[in-house]
Image (cartoon, grey):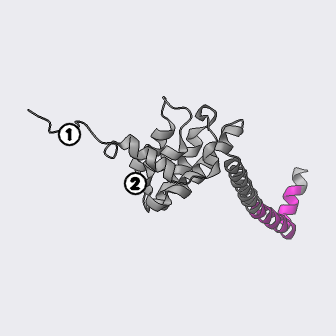
Amino acid sequence: MADAGFFKGTSADQEYRFSEMKLLKSMKFPPEFDKKVDLKKVNLNVIRPWITKKVTELVGFEDEVIIEYVMGLLEDPNHTTPDPKKMQINLTGFLTSSTASFMHALWSLLLEAQEHPAGMPQMFVEEKKEEMCKARKGDVHAIGSSLGKDQEEIGQSIDIRGKRPENDKLLEDFI
């Protein structure tokens, strides 16, 4: 059988790796994407809730497939330093026009997290501090309120003792 001069196989346009390379060359990326992130230094358990929240905001509902896909790209054991440009291209099908802003924010968090000793972005640390301060203020207010009620009850019992002579007599007998 003759092949009529045609080549067998796939063309460069049909192979996804070549189209990915074309996209990498044609797209513009922020300068932060040139910096590498070592995910061994990043606490991904802290980043996961942010990813979940952000994807939910962008998509309109909590989509576990996209969340797990993003986490899978980050947790890939073969690549401890993921390529943000390729991640953006891979996520474009899911997040469409919001992908660039999502990846820029995510990459900035990851860069910040790798610099922190605990592997957490400083922004998260500050948010947690504020949350703890608000909780303490709420606890102090609640304790103050309950003490205020107790002080009122104590004040009433003192007033009662002062007004009733039998209470004074009992108090004198006790002393």
Would you name the residue on which mark 2 appears? 93
Q: Residues within 10 Å of mark 2 (few under 14, many from 20)?
A: few
Q: Quadrant of the N terminus?
A: top left
Q: Position of residue 79 (x, y in %)?
A: 51, 32
Disc 1 residue type (three-letter)? Phe
Is residue 67 covered in magenta?
no
Which residue does the image show at 55% across and 58% down from the upper left? 101
Of residues 52 and 158, the one nearer the viewer is 52
Picture quadrant where residue 5 is located: top left
Q: Is residue 21 visible?
A: yes
Q: Residue furthest left?
A: 1
Q: Position of residue 38 (x, y in %)?
A: 61, 34
Q: Residue furthest bottom?
A: 163
What's drawn in magenta, residue-wise?
A: 147-171
Q: Residues within 10 Å of mark 1 (few under 14, many from 20)?
A: few
Disc 2 residue type (three-letter)? Gly
Picture quadrant where residue 141 is located: bottom right
In the picture provided, is 163 more to the left or to the right than 24?
right
Foreground label between 1 and 2: 1
Eyeballing the image, is 23 above or below 41? Answer: below
Secondary element under disc 1, as helix, strand or loop, is: loop
Q: Position of residue 27 (x, y in %)?
A: 51, 54
Is residue 156 covered in magenta?
yes
Secondary element under disc 2, as helix, strand or loop, is: helix
Which residue does the image show at 60% across and 37% down from the upper left? 43
Would you name the residue on which mark 1 appears? 6
